[in-house]
């Protein structure tokens, strides 16, 4: 089975790959770190039967050029971001995806953002490294015998302990979650392990499916009103676009923290900015934005009560191994005439 692999590939799974095919070639993003252009892809794919891609644009033009293509694999959660699924379906070609490949990475990043913003970790790290606000300072109480015996920075009212300490513990607090899919469940597991009380909004999941985490299924307004920490972990579908609106943000406690590691389209960013600027909520952690990269001078960059990361939540090095195993497992199922776990167009198998 002639195979082209443009995805990042964990070579520890070479033996597994070779149970599928020994006629394979690595190229494109997985080799160079640069997406193969569409014209080059059209030439490369002509005789390919199995395509394992990740970030390359597999357009209708590319699919139409692939005369022998039998299976398309996209090593992403959302294959539609790279693959023209409609064009593949029209030709009867199954499209597989790497569902859940980065669920653990996103979950860990979500909790890390909440800790960083609620405990002022990122802010004080920046002040220590890049300013002299906390270093080139003399305090009233840091001399004499006490300074020799105590490791305290200072208890003065203008010292870090008073200015930046006092953030909430997560233990015993209410963790509100929006979305309980593969990523949401990993986030919830970690919040539960920290001793938090879970309330979850997901209209597609039953209470029984949440019971193993002692979580309570509630409506969205309850999450927004009652949670001390709120995490968005839902997909973008018509029902979730603009879900976290100005009205919903207005329901939050003034002591609450908000994090979005899902997609920008679910959130009214202007409303969140206003709430943060006016201190109507305590803080936020963001990994996704309406425009990426964030434009220079964007107003969100001016806030001290928000921690920002440049869409890194799903980028752990371990993901390459996860995605390789997930997609090869499903390719083997298709070849054995079994139902794959992560298929975007199951109707082509009927």
Image (tube, rainbow, N blue to C red):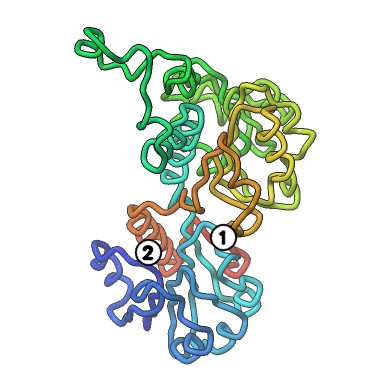
Residue at the image position 64 percent from the left and 26 percent from the top = 217
Please state which of residues 160 and 301 is positioned toward the viewer in this rendering: 160
Badge 1 element: loop
Badge 2 element: helix
Position above or below: 16 against 309: below
Residue at the image position 46 percent from the left and 86 percent from the top = 45
Residue 30 coordinates in the image, percent (x, y): 37, 72
Q: Is residue 82 left or right of residue 290?
A: left
Q: Which residue lies under the disc numbered 2?
A: 328
Residue 197 coordinates in the image, percent (x, y): 54, 19
Position above or below: 185 against 172: below
| Outermost residue, top side | 145
Please state which of residues 5 and 166 is positioned toward the viewer in this rendering: 166
The dot on residue 59 is none
Q: Which residue lies under the disc numbered 1?
A: 293
Instruction: Verify CB contact (< 8 Å) between mark 1 and mark 2.
Output: no
Neighbours of disc 2 within 10 Å: few (<14), some (14-19), many (20+): many
Q: How much space separates mark 1 and mark 2, taking CA atoms?
A: 33 Å
Position above or below: 296 against 158: below
């Amino acid at each position: 089975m002639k195979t082209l692999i443009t995805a990042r590939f964990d070579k520890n799974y070479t033996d597994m790959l070779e149970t599928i095919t020994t006629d394979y070639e690595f190229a494109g993003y997985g080799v160079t770190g640069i997406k193969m252009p569409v014209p080059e892809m059209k030439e490369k794919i002509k005789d390919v039967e199995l395509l394992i891609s990740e970030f390359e644009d597999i357009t209708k033009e590319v699919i139409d050029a692939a005369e022998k293509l039998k299976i398309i694999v996209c090593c992403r959660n959302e294959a539609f971001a790279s693959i023209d699924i409609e064009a593949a379906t029209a030709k009867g070609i199954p499209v597989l995806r790497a569902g859940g490949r980065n669920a653990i990475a996103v979950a860990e990043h979500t909790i890390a953002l909440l800790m960083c913003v609620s405990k002022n970790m990122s802010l004080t790290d920046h002040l220590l490294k890049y300013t002299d606000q906390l270093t080139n300072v003399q305090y009233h109480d840091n001399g004499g015998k006490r300074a020799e015996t105590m490791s305290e920075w200072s208890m003065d009212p203008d010292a870090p302990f008073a200015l930046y300490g006092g953030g909430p513990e997560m233990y015993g607090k209410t963790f509100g979650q929006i979305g309980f899919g593969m990523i949401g469940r990993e986030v919830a597991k970690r919040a539960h392990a920290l001793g938090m009380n879970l309330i979850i909004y997901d209209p597609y999941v039953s209470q029984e499916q949440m019971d193993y985490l002692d979580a309570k299924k509630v409506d969205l307004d309850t999450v927004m009103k009652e949670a001390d920490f709120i995490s968005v972990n839902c997909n973008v579908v018509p029902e979730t676009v603009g879900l976290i609106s100005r009205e919903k943000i207005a329901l939050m406690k003034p002591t609450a923290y908000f994090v979005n590691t899902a997609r920008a389209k679910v959130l009214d960013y202007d409303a969140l900015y206003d709430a943060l600027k006016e201190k109507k909520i305590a803080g936020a952690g963001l990994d996704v934005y309406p425009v990426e990269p964030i434009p220079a001078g964007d107003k969100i960059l001016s806030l001290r009560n928000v921690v920002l990361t440049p869409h890194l939540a799903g980028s752990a090095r371990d993901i390459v191994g996860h995605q390789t195993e997930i997609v090869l497992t499903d390719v083997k199922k298709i070849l054995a005439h079994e139902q794959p776990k992560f298929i975007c167009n199951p109707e082509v198998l009927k």
